[in-house]
Amino acid sequence: MTPNSSDRGGEFEEQAGSTRIIWLIEEGTRVKPGELVCELDSAPFEDELATQRIRHAQALSWVKQAETIFQVAEIELREYRDGIYLQDIRLVDQYLENCRTKEQEARSTYEWSQDLFRQGLRSDSQLLGDRLVFEQWQIEYENAQEMRRRLTEYTGTRILKSLEAKLEAVRSDLLSQRAAFQVEDERLKRLERAIKNCQLYAPSEGVVVYARSTNTWGRVEDQIAEGVTVRENQAVIQLPDPENMQVQVKINESKYRHIQEGMTATIRIDAFPDRPLLGTIKEIKPIPAPANFVSDVKLYSATVRIESGFEGIRPGLSAEVAFHLGDRIEVTRIPVGSIRWFEKKPYAAIAGRGGEVSWKQLDLGVSNPSYAEVLSGLAEGDRIVADPLLLPAPVFDAKPTNQLARVERLGQSRPPGR
């Protein structure tokens, strides 16, 4: 259970992602689903919400204004493209047709006047007048043709392009206003969720346990109490179910390769040492836990589910877990104390018949606190030094001690790893 994240803008920016606990249910209380367990201070979020509602309303008005301007621009484009432009073309075509008719009539009149002039039935002034009328309508007809060409190729195209560009600019502004409104709307909803989530309710039945994080020294860093400030995504309360418990264990890197998810395990709780429990490995983290300042040995976290619990188990109890690595039939084993490690490799000191000692590298399998399985490196009947630590670090002419252990061949062994 974590507090909801807060808004990161406006007056609450310096406190983004944090708030105080103003009420907390007592630790150890058993709760049911939907029961209130914690209340966070919502005052900073409510102050920011009031400001955000003003921004939200302003952004919405800008969107509506941009939508209106866009609609007007669309109407202007349709009005000219589907109305005024086509009307202008029809008017020009009508004027062009009229000029063509008048030019043809003037041409016929001028040709008739020329015939009469050649017959002496028409004067010079009359012929000149008919010629001037014909030339005038010729010019009018040519001007009408040029007028239509300018309208279709230049004026009309220019106006259409200008209106289309205006429409695209208005469209871009509308999209920008909508994007800005979306941001403000998301901020508003996030603040409303933050205020709503300032009241934490139990999602399931369980026992209230305050979530505490520890450092590498095991010291609690984040206390959970009324008046304490909690940050974004910080766990506040855990609700473990006593009837469905699990154990968090650390696995040494030397044992990591032998342990897999789904393996069974025996769990002994320190408070109930005489009541061992059966468990199953639920999850093994692939990344080791952060090393502390004392040792650089890698430890891997694993979760073991308790299959059969009993009343009285409480969260936070210490436990020891023994993993069942499987049965080994007809295997070679030697005492763990007879193994000596050189440069992270296991060796055994072999005692010869003449009293000489030689070191032999081993390939080990599974092991328990007492014995280790030998996959290769020894043969049945080899005599090994029981406590090779008494020998010098591998000096192959070292003298043997009188403490010898015989390599055993067993019918069956079940070495549980710890």
Image (cartoon, rainbow, N blue to C red):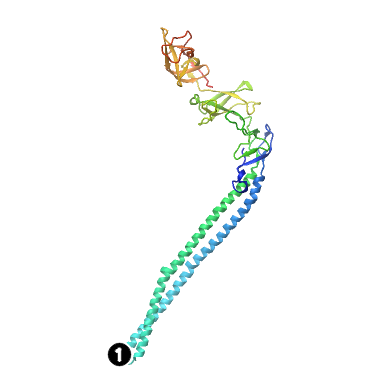
Question: Is residue 6 visible in this depiction of the protein?
Answer: no
85 w.r.t. 187: above or below: below
Q: Nearer the viewer, residue 286 or 306?
A: 286
Q: Quadrant of residue 345?
A: top left
Question: Is residue 93 visible in this depiction of the protein?
Answer: yes
Q: Position of residue 215 (x, y in %)?
A: 58, 31
372 w.r.t. 85: above or below: above
Q: Position of residue 182 (x, y in %)?
A: 56, 52
In the picture, measured across the screen, residue 32 lies left or right of residue 304, that is right
Q: Position of residue 346 (x, y in %)?
A: 45, 19
Residue pictured at 35% horizontal, 87% vertical: 128
Residue pictured at 46% horizontal, 70% vertical: 86
Q: Quadrant of residue 271?
A: top right
Question: Would you name the residue on which mark 1 appears?
Answer: 118
Q: Amino acid at mark 1?
A: Arg
User: Across the whole image, how many numbered discs are drawn on residues?
Assistant: 1
Quarter of the picture containing the C terminus is: top right
Residue density around tag 1, few if under 14, some if 14–19, many if 20 or more, within 10 Å: few
In the picture, measured across the screen, residue 247 lies left or right of residue 127, that is right
Quarter of the picture containing the N terminus is: top right
Residue pictured at 55% horizontal, 59% vertical: 66
In the picture, measured across the screen, residue 321 lies left or right of residue 404, that is right
In the picture, measured across the screen, residue 206 lies left or right of residue 76, that is right
Q: Secondary structure at mark 1?
A: helix
15 w.r.t. 275: above or below: below
Q: Position of residue 397 (x, y in %)?
A: 41, 11
Q: Quadrant of residue 36?
A: top right
Q: Nearer the viewer, residue 156 or 9?
A: 9
